[in-house]
Amino acid sequence: MSIFSKIVAGEISCYKVAENEQYFAFLDINPMTKGHTLVIPKKEIDYVFDLDEQTYLNLMLFAKKVALAIEKSVECKRIGIAVIGLEVPHAHVHLIPIQKESDMKISNPKLKLSSKNMKEIAQKIASNF
């Protein structure tokens, strides 16, 4: 069972942003920028391109709704989207609020945000979802 499946099951806490029957969105605990969110299917499938077509399309539609909520919640020019897929063996999409292209560099130092700050960000995004 992946760490993301444990989050969905409630075995590991997270800063939840949005959820429906099939998909789940939560803040990345090692964010590249303020509001960096992960969007996953609840069903554990390792690789995003192994998702069946409908699950993939619905994941992207759910991610779009989450991205629009992030835009209303965090100051940014755009929401960058990345699918890397090596970090956790569970398909996931990174939604990263950006001001410039270099904000998308995975090698950038990660932000250190307090639990209080993370909760506030998650609540703001959730309220705009």
Image: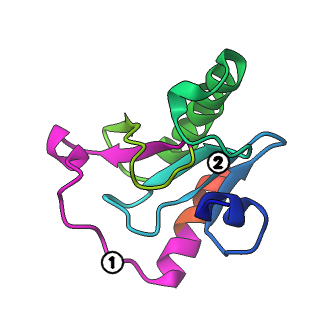
Lateral position of residue 90 relative to residue 13, left or right:
left
Between the residue at mark 2 and the residue at mark 1, the CA separation in whole angstroms equals 24 Å
Residue 93 part of the magenta-drawn span: yes
Write down the quadrant of residue 125 in the picture: bottom right
Write down the quadrant of residue 17 in the picture: bottom right
* Residue toward you, 46 or 21: 46
From the image, tell me which residue sits under label 1: 112
From the image, tell me which residue sits under label 2: 128
Q: Residues within 10 Å of mark 1 (few under 14, many from 20)?
A: some
Magenta segment range? 91-120
Residue 1 percent across, percent down from the top left:
68, 60
Residue at 51 percent of width and 47 percent of height: 70
Residue 42 percent across, percent down from the top left:
73, 46
Instruction: Check the image and report above or below for 60 versus 3.
Output: above
Q: Amino acid at mark 2?
A: Asn
Instruction: Check the image and report above or below for 94 versus 15.
Output: above
Lateral position of residue 108 relative to residue 46, left or right:
left
Q: Amino acid at mark 1?
A: Lys
> Is residue 89 in view from this perspective?
yes
Instruction: Check the image and report above or below for 83 versus 50.
Output: below
